[in-house]
Image: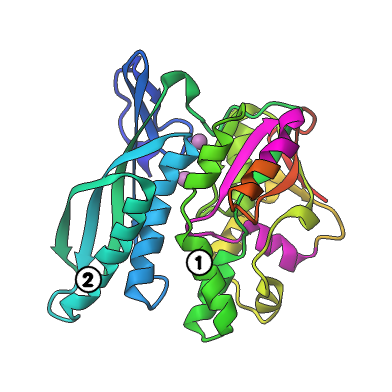
């Protein structure tokens, strides 16, 4: 939608703008500091208001981590049906969010709320990084290895919540995965030569991977059996629990993905499944990948996995084996 905006005069300090569908805007304010700015909000995806606040905050903060930055300040964005819902629900959303802001080390500086038909919550986040250390989504180099730090299957599992289709253990796990900050993953990876990074959200693993391939004019080879997937996702998808957005991603990605015969349509949907508050997908030099993975696991990023590699044949295309 934003690309329909009229073109403005280029500003040399704008390091990352609208052109590359990146996670956040980046603007250089001095030789050693660049501002990272991002905004994200949505309607509740879980019933527990405190958990919703945590997830929305982790999701909004994630775009700063995906740029290799450190979040500094946060503004809350609130829509709430004041006349229909008890204000204690809003208090719980805000307190969940505040826990995550605290954990991130950022500080809440304000916000804005409006009376709305249904609850909405999110944040505008400002972070900083060094101008020469910005992780765009378009710097992947042939010979890199690809690391994913959180499991996929989130869209299918959260759709199952609405149909009471999850076990208690599954519900706990998907909520905990969504509420986990990408802070540790980003901090660990900052010690390595990250060539490109993004976080996995609405376009799914393959949608965001596609943006990375097209951004760099490279190809990806992914190994399905190395992709971390929330337990039980396949059986939910087999029962027909696949969100419309996930199938739309799958259709939209047809031109850019070649699946091996062993990857049936169910597993294709899982790879395209829309994610909320997903993990980082990072492209790092192959010789650093094992060490990066070990450090991630040590830091408690337990789902982290090497899921494939960057190649120069089949540019703008992902091969899944
Ligand atoms: Co993002
Ligand atoms: Co975002
Ligand atoms: Co990035």
Question: Pointer 2: what residue?
Answer: 90
Image coordinates for residue 69, horizontal then vertical, percent: 43, 34
Image coordinates for residue 2, horizontal then vertical, percent: 36, 40
Q: Could one spot residue 243 in this view of the protein?
A: no
Residue 316 included in the magenta stretch of the image:
no
Q: Residue at x 77, y 33 (%)?
A: 314
Question: Pointer 1: what residue?
Answer: 176
Closer to the camera in the image, 179 or 299: 299
Depicted 118 relative to depicted 316: above or below: below
Magenta residues (range): 264-293
Q: Measure how far apart labels 2 and 1 are at the Cα level.
A: 20 Å
Callout 2: helix, strand or loop?
A: helix
Closer to the camera in the image, 44 or 178: 178
Residue furthest bottom in the image: 164
Image coordinates for residue 137, horizontal then vertical, percent: 54, 34
Q: Which image quarter: residue 267?
A: bottom right
């Amino acid at each position: 939608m934003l690309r329909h905006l009229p073109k403005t005069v280029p500003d040399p300090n704008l390091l990352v703008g609208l052109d590359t569908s990146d996670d956040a805007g980046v603007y250089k304010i001095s030789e050693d500091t660049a501002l990272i700015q991002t905004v994200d909000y949505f309607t509740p995806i879980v019933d527990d208001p405190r958990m919703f606040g945590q997830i929305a905050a982790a999701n909004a903060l994630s775009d700063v981590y995906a740029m290799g930055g450190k979040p500094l300040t946060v503004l809350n964005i609130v829509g709430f049906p004041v006349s229909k819902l008890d204000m204690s629900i809003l208090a719980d959303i805000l307190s969940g969010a505040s826990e995550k802001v605290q954990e991130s080390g950022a500080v809440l500086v304000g916000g804005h709320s409006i009376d709305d038909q249904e609850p909405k919550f999110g944040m505008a986040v400002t972070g900083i990084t060094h101008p020469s250390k910005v992780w765009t989504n378009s710097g992947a180099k042939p010979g890199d290895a690809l690391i994913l730090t959180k499991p996929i299957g989130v869209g299918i599992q959260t759709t199952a919540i609405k149909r009471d289709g999850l076990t208690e253990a599954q519900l706990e796990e998907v909520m905990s995965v969504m509420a986990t900050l990408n802070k540790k993953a980003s901090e660990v990876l900052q010690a390595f030569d990250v060539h490109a990074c993004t976080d996995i959200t609405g376009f799914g693993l393959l949608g965001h991977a596609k943006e990375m391939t097209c951004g760099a004019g490279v190809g990806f080879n992914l190994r399905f059996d190395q992709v971390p997937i929330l337990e039980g996702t396949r059986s939910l998808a087999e029962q027909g629990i696949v969100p419309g957005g996930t199938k739309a991603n799958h259709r939209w990605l047809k031109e850019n993905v070649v699946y091996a015969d062993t990857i049936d349509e169910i597993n294709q949907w899982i790879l395209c499944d829309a994610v909320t508050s997903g993990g980082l997908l990072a492209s790092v030099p192959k010789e650093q990948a094992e060490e990066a993975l070990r450090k991630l696991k040590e830091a408690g990023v337990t789902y982290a996995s090497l899921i494939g590699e960057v190649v120069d044949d089949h540019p703008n295309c992902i091969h899944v084996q």
